[in-house]
Amino acid sequence: MSNTPSLATTDSSQRRAPRAPQRVAASPAPQLPRSGETQLSARQVKKSYRKGQVSIPVLRGVDLEVRRGEFLAIIGQSGSGKSTLLHLLGTLDAPDSGEIHFGGRRIDNLPARDRDALRNRQFGMIFQFYHLLPELTMLENVLAPQMIASGVFQYLRQRKAHVEAATQLLSLVGLEHRLKHKPRELSGGEMQRAAIARALVTGPEVLLADEPTGNLDHQTGREILNLLRTLNRAHHLTICMVTHDLSIAQEADRIVRLAEGQVVEA
């Protein structure tokens, strides 16, 4: 495990969004596009949901830019549309109108298979309630996206390397002693750490976090926030996080506030 990046590392040579660890150890990271350029954006995005015969507007024309390498917090009260916006950015849902762009390419209108591939490879996602598979161990949960990305036969051919990569990621988030444990045997903070490792296993460019501390006590929530901040600083991982907690949002580089489905403060 000597090649596993430390959470305390701030050396500039680690300023690469975490790839599968065997890739990090094998060769220097390629040159990144310059920090600060727009990486992910929403343009005049609108979204409504229907309840019976009633249409309920949630987003009313949102413009948002997420810059490469930044830690962005989207804050707002319940019902303000912040989680809806995050789901649209990650192509989990589609806007009624407007556009979502990633790396200069429109992505909201891509075929379902291409959107699935984006979420598997370019976007890592973590949620308030973890969404770990209860029948799998922590190691198996972290390996699941890699199995999907590789396909069965390719995964089996490279299984040893994938297991080593997932094990290093679990070590990175402080769970090297929990590889064979199932979710029911872990605390909330440990499950969220495992969910972060799972989100990173395919080497995403952007981490989308939906209330990642919302189901945790204050101390554990701060630990998860510190972990995200370290990943952002040490590995240049772009993070877009939604939260209702201003004290959590203030740890980000930049805050965007939503109210009544619109950006009202940046």
Image (cartoon, rainbow, N blue to C red):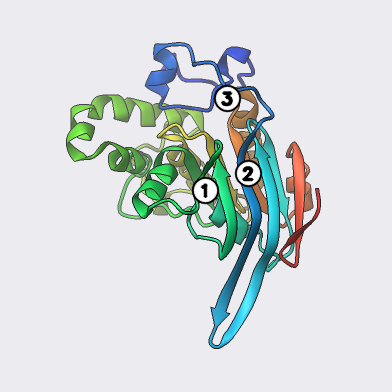
| Alpha-carbon span between mark 3 and mark 2 | 15 Å
Residue highlighted by disc 3: 235
**Circle on res. 126:** 1
Does 160 sit left or right of 5 as displayed? left
Q: Is residue 43 visible?
A: yes
- Callout 1 amino acid: Ile
Is the residue under label 2 in contact with that under label 3 (CB below 8 Å)?
no
Residue highlighted by disc 2: 240
Task: Point out the tag, 1 or 2, that comes first from the N-terminus.
Answer: 1
- Callout 3 amino acid: His
Residue 262, image x, y percentages: 74, 61
Which image quadrant: the N terminus? top left
Residue 217, image x, y percentages: 65, 53
Q: Residues within 10 Å of mark 1 (few under 14, many from 20)?
A: many
Task: Point out the tag, 3 or 2, that comes first from the N-terminus.
Answer: 3
Look at 64% across and 18% down and name the residue there: 10
Is 74 located above or below residue 173 in the figure?
Answer: below
**Circle on res. 169:** none
| Alpha-carbon span between mark 3 and mark 1 | 18 Å
Q: Secondary structure at mark 2?
A: strand
- Callout 2 amino acid: Cys
